[in-house]
Image (cartoon, helix red, strand yellow):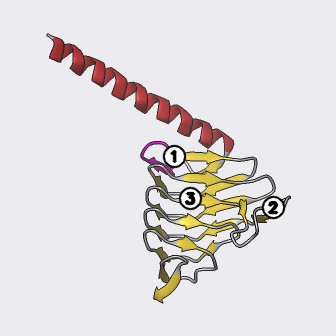
C-alpha cells in the first residue's frame, strides 16, 4: 500500500514539475520573440534581461542553459540550431583581463548572433559581441571569444579554428 502511495505521489510531483517548467517557458515566449517551433529541450533553462532575444524556427536549447540580454542589446538564434545543455550566452559581462580592485569595472557588451543550422556543444560559453556563421560547429566545453566563420568547426578555451 505504501509503495502504491509513493508511486502516486511521485507521478503527481513529476507532472507538477513539468507544468511549472512549461509555465516558465510560456512566459519566455510572451516576453521574447521565439518561434512557435522553438523548443526548450529540458529543464531549468533561463532567459532573462531587458534586451531582446529572437529564436528561429526548428531550433532548440538544452537543459540548464542561460541566455541573458541586457537593455539595448539582443541575442539572435537562427533557424535549425541545435544548442546543447549548459550553454551560457550573455550580452554583458565583465572584462576578463581587468584589475577587479578598481571601481567601476568596465563591462564588455555586445549583440550575439547565431547563424542558421549551427550546432553548439555542451558547456559552451558565448561572450558578448560574438557572431557565429551559418552551419558552424562549436565543440563542447569551448569559450567563444571571436567571430566564427560559416561552416567552421571550432573548439577549446579559447575556441580556435579546427577545420571546415
Secondary structure of the residue carrying tag 1 is loop
Q: Answer left or right for 164 relative to 110.
A: left
Real-space Cα separation, disc 3 to disc 2, in angstroms = 21 Å
Report x, y in % for residue 154: 49, 80
Q: Do the residues labelled 1 and 3 touch (CB within 8 Å)?
A: no
Task: State the residue in front, 152 or 98.
Answer: 98
Q: Can residue 164 be seen in this view?
A: no
Report x, y in % for residue 45: 51, 46
Secondary structure of the residue carrying tag 2 is loop
Q: Which of marks 1 and 3 is nearer the N terminus?
A: 1
Magenta includes 43?
yes
Residue located beneath label 3 in the image: 88
By secondary structure, the bulk of the magenta-drawn segment is best described as loop
Q: Quick one: label 2, few (<14), some, or many (20+) residues within 10 Å?
A: few
Residue located beneath label 2 in the image: 105
Q: Earlier in the sequence, mark 3 or mark 2?
A: 3
Q: In this view, does 92 lie above or below 64?
A: below
Amino acid at each position: 500500500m505504501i509503495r502504491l502511495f509513493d508511486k502516486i505521489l511521485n507521478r503527481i510531483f513529476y507532472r507538477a514539475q513539468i507544468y511549472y517548467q512549461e509555465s516558465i517557458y510560456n512566459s519566455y515566449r510572451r516576453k521574447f520573440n521565439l518561434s512557435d517551433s522553438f523548443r526548450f529541450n529540458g529543464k531549468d533553462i533561463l532567459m532573462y534581461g531587458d534586451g531582446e532575444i529572437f529564436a528561429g524556427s526548428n531550433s532548440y536549447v538544452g537543459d540548464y542553459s542561460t541566455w541573458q540580454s541586457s537593455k539595448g542589446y539582443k541575442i539572435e538564434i537562427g533557424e535549425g540550431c541545435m544548442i546543447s545543455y549548459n550553454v551560457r550566452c550573455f550580452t554583458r559581462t565583465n572584462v576578463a583581463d581587468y584589475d577587479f580592485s578598481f571601481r567601476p569595472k568596465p563591462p564588455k557588451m555586445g549583440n550575439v548572433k547565431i547563424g542558421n543550422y549551427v550546432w553548439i556543444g555542451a558547456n559552451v560559453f558565448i561572450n558578448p559581441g560574438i557572431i557565429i556563421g551559418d552551419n558552424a560547429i562549436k565543440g563542447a566545453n569551448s569559450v567563444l571569444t571571436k567571430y566564427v566563420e560559416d561552416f567552421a568547426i571550432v573548439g577549446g578555451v579559447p575556441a580556435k579554428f579546427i577545420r571546415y
